[in-house]
Amino acid sequence: MDGETNALRFRVGLVECVAISDGSFTYPTANFFPGAPPAALAQAFGAAGVPEQIISPYTCLAIEAEGRWVLLDTGAAGMGPTTGHLRTNLETAGIRGSDIATVILTHAHPDHIGGVIGDDGQLSFPEAQLYMTKQEWDFWSEPDLLSRLPRHLPEVARERQTRTFQSRLPALRGKVTLIESETEVARGIRVLLAPGHTPGHAIVELTSGHESLLYISDILLHPIHMTHPEWHPVYDMDREAAEKTRCHVLGRTTSEGMLVSAFHFRFPGLGHTRSTGRTWSWEPVV
């Protein structure tokens, strides 16, 4: 591990990967589990062995591709002093900004696109090819965006999400390749559509030899969402679609024994999913 909890190098098959911390952010518990019965929620926290305070890590992933790197998401620059450390931690891990050839933005929430531009308003990785799904771009580019966000989303989140994307739109326009279906962006690295959390939410699959990894972005925000996939965080825009996607992805990662990279799980966010009958559990890689 590079730094105490900042970067972790590992391999998937022959491919080198680095889990990179951008920092963490503290959320109200009610935002992650609205509507969950209090007694059942307390029992779930105890069974999972995690604190009831939601201090959520932001862990991006860098994947080596023919001498350069593919970066999955850019962290949450601008959300406060506990986030926005991706660039520094990349450099500490020996990855310069000019080494990044490709950036995949899984969706347009502030903690995933915040670091795509720097304090100067310019792209943080100007030499990189950027990718986002067309469904995601079209939704967030709407002029009446604020009115289209779901009413169950807290007002502070609605305003932050709108402000973050609109402030980055000028730098991104014309620089992003928009994809509408499953797309291989580099050898063994595929972007897959996984809607629900946002309209054009995506996940990323890495395959090398007989090994595979699935970067699930915000399919899951907390390990308890594995045991209770019906407890929707307020940030899921389409709850029914999000739950359907969540269960489909968990079924696949479990049946195929895939390594999972979970953006919001305890750093480095790596582990496997296990079936517990009708639901699932998390087995972290230590």
Image (cartoon, helix red, strand yellow):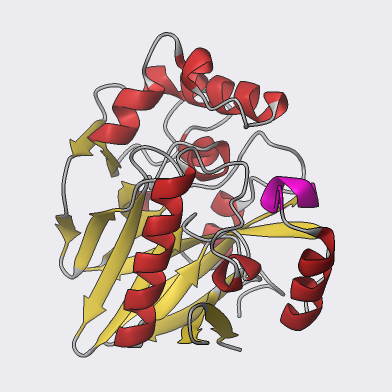
Above or below residue 216? Residue 167 is above
- Residue at the (69%, 58%) spot, across then down: 56
Above or below residue 107? Residue 117 is above
- Is there any visible trace of residue 27 in the rendered image? no
Residue 195: % across, % down: 35, 47
- Residue at the (32%, 86%) spot, across then down: 255
Q: Nearer the viewer, residue 168 or 271?
A: 271
| Horizontal side, residue 167 vs residue 25: left or right | left
- Is there any visible trace of residue 79 in the rendered image? yes
- Residue at the (62%, 49%) spot, across then down: 233
Residue 6: % across, % down: 64, 67
Above or below residue 165? Residue 186 is below
Residue 20: % across, % down: 54, 64
The extreme top residue here reads 143
Write the start and end of the magenta stretch as one range.
Answer: 28-35
Q: Nearer the viewer, residue 93 or 57?
A: 57
The image quadrant of residue 246 is: bottom left
Residue 236 colored in magenta in the image: no
Residue 31 colored in magenta in the image: yes
- Residue at the (55%, 87%) spot, across then down: 285
The image quadrant of residue 286 is: bottom right
